[in-house]
Image (spheres, grey):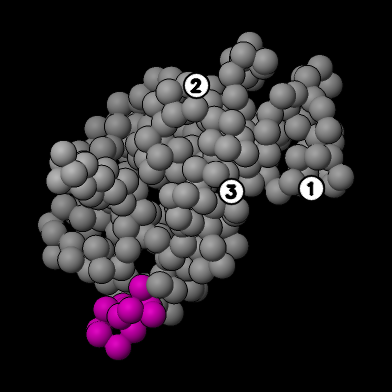
């Protein structure tokens, strides 16, 4: 029985680790013909050094403006963009940033786009490019060459029950758990969030700042810490529906990614328009 328990624990640990892989795990896959590595930084930083064969990805190409907020593009538009990145239906995609600005959030939103549109194998590099450099700076594994790629053949199939709109969120207030990914100063209304006219948060939501899930090196915190933050402090249940939101979608995508891909919550939705829509309307339920 003890042996069975140990094997089960190791299996679950291994399964969880695919959401956030480390540098050694990525290095072992560099020669895999199916691997696609996406870098979320800007061109200037990318040209100074990146992981070999990585391609730049621009999260803005996955979204479109609707009034004061943005929404994810249609599957057809996303499919076209993924083709240009060389992504196929059997691709293994690893995403990372250089830990500058919102690059880690751009990684989680890119992961959201891929998973929502049907790709199965997606990971984020834990610690990002700085972690890779610390391991392999002197091993010829930092490149300044932009690699070309064949056009991919990925077929986008939008998964239902992930992206939700204003009316859906309204209908679930007081019924399900909602978590907000913005800093607490915006959640409690002590400061106005950029691009949002009203102070406070969606009625009944709980604060779950995305940055608290990572240490100073942008590495994911321990399972114990994550369970404390999500299960104990936020009162979430892995088997029950959760909606995550933020200012405009990026921060919420990280909570969505950790909950679904790492902690294996069964039903997590994301309100993509978030407070850029909700907080700029006069009749949406809010509190401080």
- Snapshot quadrant of residue 21: bottom left
Mark 2 = which residue?
Answer: 241
Could you tell me if residue 173 is visible in this image? yes
Spatial separation of the CA atoms under disc 1 and disc 2: 26 Å
| Along the line of sight, the residue nearer the viewer: 72 or 8 | 8
Question: Is disc 2 placed on a helix, strand or loop?
Answer: loop
Q: Position of residue 93 (x, y in %)?
A: 28, 51
Which of 6 and 284 lies nearest the eye of the viewer? 6
Whether pointer 1 and pointer 3 mark residues with C-beta atoms closer than 8 Å, the reply is no
Pick whichever, 16 or 153, lies toward us.
16
> Of the residues under marks 1 and 3, which one precedes in the sequence?
1
- Residue 134, magenta (yes or no): yes
Q: CA–CA distance between discs 1 and 3?
A: 13 Å
Q: How far apart are marks 2 and 3 (CA)?
A: 19 Å
- Looking at the image, residue 229 sits to the left or right of residue 93; the answer is right
Can you give x and y, in whole percent of width and height, for residue 245 in the image?
61, 34
Left or right: 53, with 278 as reference point: left
Q: Which of marks 2 and 3 is nearer the N terminus?
A: 3
The residue under the point 32% across, 63% down is 22
Residue occupied by mark 1: 185
The single residue placed furthest to the top in the displayed view is 171
- Residue drawn 53% across the image and 58% down it: 214
The stretch in magenta equals 132-144
The location of residue 39, given as percent across then percent down, is 40, 61
| The label number, if any, that marks residue 210 in the structure image | 3
Rendered image: mark on residue 17: none
Q: Which residue lies furthest to the right in this view?
A: 190
| Location of residue 8 by image quarter | top left
């Amino acid at each position: 029985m003890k042996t069975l328990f140990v094997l089960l624990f190791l299996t679950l640990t291994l399964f969880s680790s695919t959401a956030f892989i480390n540098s050694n795990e990525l290095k072992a896959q560099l020669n895999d013909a199916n691997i696609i590595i996406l870098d979320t930084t800007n061109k200037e930083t990318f040209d100074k050094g990146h992981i070999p064969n990585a391609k730049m990805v621009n999260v803005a190409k996955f979204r479109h403006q609707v009034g004061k907020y943005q929404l994810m593009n249609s599957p057809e538009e996303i499919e076209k963009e993924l083709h240009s990145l060389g992504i196929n239906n059997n691709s293994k995609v690893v995403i990372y940033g250089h830990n500058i600005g919102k690059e880690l959030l751009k990684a989680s939103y890119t992961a959201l786009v891929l998973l929502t549109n049907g790709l199965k194998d997606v990971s984020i590099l834990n610690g990002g490019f700085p972690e890779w450099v610390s391991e392999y700076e002197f091993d010829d594994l930092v490149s300044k060459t932009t690699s070309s790629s064949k056009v991919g053949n990925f077929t986008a199939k939008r998964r239902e029950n992930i992206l939700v709109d204003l009316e859906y969120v309204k209908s679930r207030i007081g019924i399900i758990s909602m978590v907000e990914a913005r800093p607490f100063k915006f959640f409690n209304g002590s400061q106005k969030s950029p691009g949002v006219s009203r102070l406070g948060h969606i009625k009944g939501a709980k604060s779950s700042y995305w940055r608290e899930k990572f240490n100073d090196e942008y590495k994911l915190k321990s399972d114990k810490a994550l369970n404390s933050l999500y299960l104990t402090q936020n009162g979430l249940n892995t088997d029950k529906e959760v909606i995550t939101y933020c200012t405009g979608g990026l921060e919420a995508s990280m909570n969505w990614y950790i909950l679904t891909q790492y902690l294996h919550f069964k039903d997590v939705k994301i309100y993509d328009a978030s407070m850029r829509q909700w907080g700029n309307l006069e009749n949406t339920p809010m509190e401080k």
